[in-house]
Amino acid sequence: MSQVEESVRVGVPVRTAYNQWTQFETFPEFMEGVERIEQRTDTLTHWVTNVAGVRREFDAAITEQRPDERVAWTTVDGEAKQAGVVTFHRIDDSTTKVMLQMEFEPEGLAETVGDKLGVVKRRVSGDLHRFKDFIEQRGGRETGAWRGGTAGPGGGATGGPGGGTTAGPGGGGTI
């Protein structure tokens, strides 16, 4: 397994950054290589990616979700193997640090070499910076919100309806 950890400071409050992050269906607008994401249930997303001409489909399960704090995921089916967590840290009333930690399994020689050359790390960093631009260019207004949560591994979803959850940038924009 390989690991990557990246962060970005976003010029919006924690609640706004978190709310936008939970709108995973907008990820293709700022996440390189992500063609489509569908929310299948409160805790299951389906991803379609195309990176360097390699198209993949996979499902990711939300394993833990705490509003304004963290979203953790793992792939459960399909052509990618990864897990990670994105956390939200209040810097001040209008600034949030968004941190992504991810483990993934490169497949084949090209992905292994790309990982060793830092391609995945650069892609994650780029995705986070595009997320920053996406939310800041909207004047700090999120496209929606999901304020529900999960109880952790094996736990069911809690909270209200609507919005979506996320598999994070690692969910498909990196491999």
Image (spheres, grey):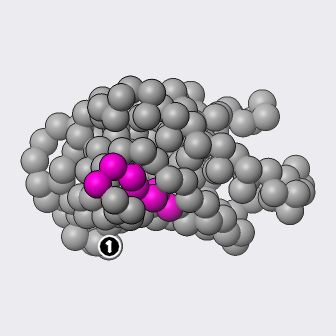
Which quarter of the picture shows residue 118? bottom right
Circle 1 crowding by C-alpha within 10 Å: few under 14, some 14–19, many from 20: few
Q: Position of residue 4 (x, y in %)?
A: 66, 65
Q: Main secondary structure of the magenta part?
A: strand
Which quarter of the picture shows residue 87? bottom left
157 relative to 96 in the view: left or right? left
| Residue corresponding to mark 1 | 153
The answer to whether residue 77 of the structure is visible from this angle is no
Amino acid type, mark 1 = Pro
Depth check: give the residue in front, 19 or 174: 19
The answer to whether residue 66 of the structure is visible from this angle is yes
Q: Position of residue 133 (x, y in %)?
A: 52, 34
Depth check: give the residue in front, 160 or 123: 123
Q: Secondary structure at mark 1?
A: loop
Depth check: give the residue in front, 78 or 152: 152
Which quarter of the picture shows residue 159? bottom left
Q: Position of residue 28 (x, y in %)?
A: 52, 30
Q: Residue at x 50, y 53 (%)?
A: 9
Give the residues in magenta. Answer: 93-99
Tell how many labels: 1
Depth check: give the residue in front, 154 or 34: 34
Does the segment drawn in magenta span residue 170? no
